[in-house]
Image: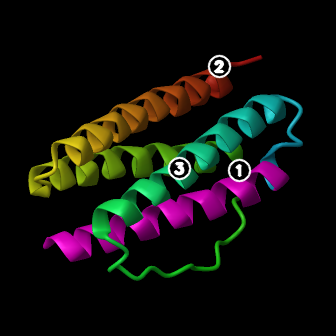
C-alpha cells in the first residue's frame, strides 16, 4: 500500500470509528449491565481518535481526502465490542506500516504512541467482552 493510500485508509478508519462510537454511546449507553462503562470507554476512544486525525492531517500535509460514511446501528454490545476489537487490531497493524513509511522522527514517535494506544484500547475492549460474557 503506497503512503497516500495508507494515509487515506487510516483517516477513513478513524472517522468511521468516531462516528460508530458516538452512535453506539446513544444506543448502548442505556444498557443496565454496562452502559456507563461503555459510554466512558467509547467517549474516551472517540476523543483519542479525534486527536489522531489532527496528527494524520499534519503527517499527510493535508493532501489526503477522506470520506464519511453513514453508519448502521449496532445490534448488541457483544457485536459492537467484537467489531471494535477487530478494528483496533487492524488499525495497530496499519499504523505499524505507517511507521515504516515515515522519515520524520517526531512523526514516527507520535505514531508509535498511537500503536500503543490501539493495543491498550484492544485490551480494554477485550476485558469488557470477558466481563460481559461471565454469567451474572
- The quadrant the C terminus occupies is top right
* Left or right: 84, with 40 as reference point: left
Residue 83, percent from left and from top: 51, 52
Task: Determine if the magenta segment contains residue 13.
Answer: yes
Residue 106, percent from left and from top: 24, 42
- The quadrant the N terminus occupies is bottom left
* Left or right: 99, with 19 as reference point: left
Task: Determine if the magenta segment contains residue 112.
Answer: no
Residue at position x 44%, y 28% from top?
120
Residue occupied by mark 3: 51
Residue occupied by mark 1: 76
Residue stretch in magenta: 1-26
* Left or right: 28, with 43 as reference point: right
Q: Front-most of 26 and 58? A: 58
Say which of marks 1 and 3 sits in front. Answer: 3
Q: Could you tell me how far apart the alpha carbons at marks 2 and 1 are, in whole angstroms?
A: 16 Å
Residue occupied by mark 2: 134
Name which of mark 2 and mark 1 comes first in the sequence.
1
Name which of mark 3 and mark 2 comes first in the sequence.
3
Residue 44, percent from left and from top: 65, 38
Residue 50, percent from left and from top: 57, 54
Main secondary structure of the magenta stretch: helix
Residue at position x 77%, y 49% from top?
25
Q: Could you tell me how far apart the alpha carbons at marks 1 and 3 are, in whole angstroms?
A: 27 Å
Name which of mark 1 and mark 3 comes first in the sequence.
3
Q: Front-most of 136 and 10? A: 10
Q: Could you tell me how far apart the alpha carbons at marks 3 and 2 are, in whole angstroms?
A: 34 Å
Q: Front-most of 47 and 75? A: 47
Amino acid at each position: 500500500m503506497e503512503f497516500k493510500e495508507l494515509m487515506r485508509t487510516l483517516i477513513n478508519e478513524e472517522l468511521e470509528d468516531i462516528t460508530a462510537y458516538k452512535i453506539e454511546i446513544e444506543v448502548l449507553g442505556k444498557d443496565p449491565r454496562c452502559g456507563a462503562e461503555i459510554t466512558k470507554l467509547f467517549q474516551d476512544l472517540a476523543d483519542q481518535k479525534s486527536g489522531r486525525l489532527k496528527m494524520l492531517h499534519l503527517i499527510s500535509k493535508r493532501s489526503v481526502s477522506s470520506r464519511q460514511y453513514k453508519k448502521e446501528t449496532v445490534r448488541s454490545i457483544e457485536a459492537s465490542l467484537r467489531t471494535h476489537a477487530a478494528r483496533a487490531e487492524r488499525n495497530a497493524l496499519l499504523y505499524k506500516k505507517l511507521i515504516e513509511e515515515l522519515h520524520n522522527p517526531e512523526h514516527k514517535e507520535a505514531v508509535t504512541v498511537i500503536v500503543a494506544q490501539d493495543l491498550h484500547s484492544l485490551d480494554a475492549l477485550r476485558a469488557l467482552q470477558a466481563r460481559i460474557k461471565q454469567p451474572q
